[in-house]
Image (cartoon, helix red, strand yellow):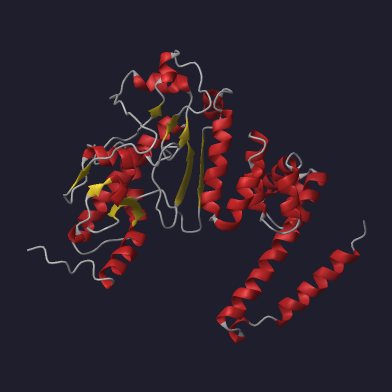
Amino acid sequence: METVAIDEAVTWLEKANADLDPELLSDPAAREMFAAFARAEKLVSFGKTMLARKINDAATVAKVAGTSVGKAKASLEAGNVLAQAPEVRTAFQRGGISLDQAAEIARAEVAKPGCASELLNAAGTESFQVLREKSRKIVLEAQQGKGLAERQREARFARRDTDELGMVHVHLAWEPHIGTPLANRAEIEAARLYREAKQAGEPEPFERYLADAYAAMLSDSGSTRRSSKPEMVILVSHEIPKRGWDEVKEGEICSIPGVGPISPEKAKEIANDAFLTGVFYDGKDLRHMKRWTRNTPVEVRLALQLGDPPEFDGLKCVDCGKRFRLEIDHVEPHIAGGPASVDNSDPRCHNCHKAKTINDLRAGKFNRDTS
């Protein structure tokens, strides 16, 4: 194969870049042009990924591409995975999906053959964040009975570096049962700090309070407070402990909602020192009770925290897919007669919750006379 076609394409791209003046474009024209460049980038990514696999030298790939060795290694890994997933490779080859999308879908297809079609459809309609969560869940569930606990333990690490401002960056990878309660504890403490600052009229971005919360926890300063909320919930199908915590069969659950599967042996270890609650699921809804109060009953909160059945995959914003710092929103506002119930409650992030409240105000839903 000669490089004539590539050389011609590069020449045309160079001309397109030379002629590009975004300030002269209308908004629709800019969006159309951006989509064209994005598709060109996807097509180029396919060639780079496949050739990187052939070269099989991360240092060389990194030098030629002008990127880090870490990203070059990721490209080589993606090429190796795509070689085992022809349907995904074809979609990537045609420019229908990006390298990031292709890598996620291919890993899921290798772990569970036959799932690629559904994920490729999702790639065209869902955000990358949602696609990655779906792919990741498929991979974890497929690997759950294959030494998952040991692999998770071997994957833990800590890495530190310093930026140009002198700020210390710490990247930690913990096993799910270790990281989840720590992360939740920090989120709860940061929320408390944010509320106090907001009441004082001088709030900073939430991420700064989250950094303060982690610093207090890691320095063992004792300034963080224990919350009455559970720091971790593990959902285990009743059949698993009945069999002796030996395996997870198809259709069963052994996972942390919103995080992912954990091994049965690790769940058993945690269960020895935990509050146990039985949840009876009728195949339709976890809880049908309603209460006409503004405060959400504990039964409804439990149902919402677990997520929609039958996956029980935890909470995420119904509008943007975000999983962190969610608020429970009344679909039909309480002042308009909406009950505190599962079917009238949606998880939303703060921004989406605020946007919906504004829309409800404009729709006149807060004008109901409650006297």
Q: How many marks?
A: 0
Question: Compared to 345, does 283 lie above or below?
Answer: above
Q: Residue furthest left?
A: 371
What is the quadrant of the C terminus in the image? bottom left
Q: Nearer the viewer, residue 82 or 249?
A: 249
Q: Nearer the viewer, residue 176 or 338?
A: 338
On screen, residue 331 above or below 217: below
The quadrant in which residue 240 appears is: top left
Q: Nearer the viewer, residue 362 or 105?
A: 362
**Residue 169, position as x, y percentages in the image:** 47, 48
In the displayed structure image, the side of residue 117 where residue 242 appears, left or right: left
Check the image and name the residue furthest to the right: 2
Which quarter shows the N terminus?
bottom right
Q: Position of residue 360 (x, y in %)?
A: 28, 66
In the image, residue 48 lies at what x, y percent?
76, 54
- Residue 63 in view: no
Quarter holding residue 9? bottom right
Whether residue 12 is visible, yes or no, is yes
Question: Could you tell me residue 93's position as x and y percent?
Answer: 76, 54
* 174 displayed left or right of 2: left
Name the residue furthest bottom: 24
Q: Nearer the viewer, residue 244 or 65?
A: 244
> Taking 82 as reference, is 14 above or below it?
below
Q: Is residue 198 left or right of residue 172?
A: left
